[in-house]
Amino acid sequence: MLGEAEPHWLSEEVKTGTTIIAIEFNGGVVLGSDSRVSAGASVVNRVMNKLSPLHDKIYCALSGSAADAQTIAEMVNYQLDVHSMEIGEDPQVRSAANLVRNISYKYKEELSAHLIVAGWDRRAGGQVFATLNGLLTRQPFAVGGSGSSYVYGFVDAEYRKGMSKEDCQQFVVNTLSLAMNRDGSSGGVAYLVSIDEHCTEEKVILGNDLPTFFDQ
């Protein structure tokens, strides 16, 4: 009714309080994220896909402000399309990561977003890049979002060099399940994207189908 105060969450920034992860395997990468979007203590979207395509074989995982992260992804997607047409071939993963880094640094005072960029290209194979306010570093795996602080010990203990694609997929699912159980801002379903030379495979795992652990 007129004159009534609006709900407090309407004036709060919508954030992807989240868990995101990407990992390299021999010949490709696997990315994963939860799907919960929150504004303060309120959940405003239960099934947002936070894995956004930047090109055919390059994706990014979004965290931070939902609007800011999606805007960066859309800008980079457009610039990569133009760049691909100019060079006559698919862009490199590092090129996409550099674009994300440059935008994040240029607008670091206005934007609140952290993106993990991962994909495959014919020059360097599968690659994972962490970007944050001008930082750009390639890592064998990267985690981010509010849920990441709950799983750093798990990923450090469980990661092994030379894991297969199937091992990496299970590693990502287990990490997301643990984070979603502990972090109140993470939840919903788990989205996975697996990228290699031959295909890009997207998958959704419902909450009821996620693995459970001793305290669940």
Image (tube, rainbow, N blue to C red):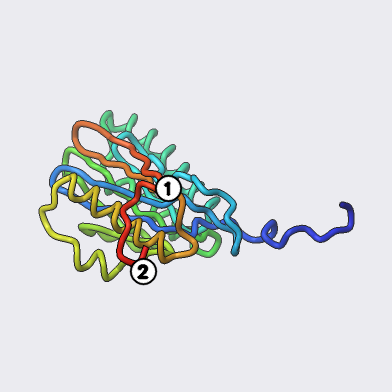
Q: Which residue is at 89% across, 53% downward? A: 2
Q: Which residue is at 33% across, 44% downward? A: 192
* SS type, badge 2: helix
- Extreme-left residue of the structure: 162
Inspect the image, locate mark 1, and give the three-letter code of the amino acid beneath it: Val
Residue 142: x and y in percent read 29, 59
Work out whether residue 161 or residue 67 is closer to the camera in this orientation and state it. 161
Mark 2 packing: few (<14 Cα in 10 Å), some, or many (20+)? some
Inspect the image, locate mark 2, and give the three-letter code of the amino acid beneath it: Tyr
Residue 48: x and y in percent read 49, 45
- The circle drawn on residue 150 is 2
Mark 1 packing: few (<14 Cα in 10 Å), some, or many (20+)? many
Q: How many marks?
A: 2
Cα–Cα gap, marks 2 and 1: 18 Å
- The circle drawn on residue 189 is 1
> Of callouts 2 and 1, which one flags the residue occurring earlier in the amino acid sequence?
2
Q: In this view, does 123 lie to the left or right of 183?
A: left
Q: Is residue 163 left or right of residue 214?
A: left
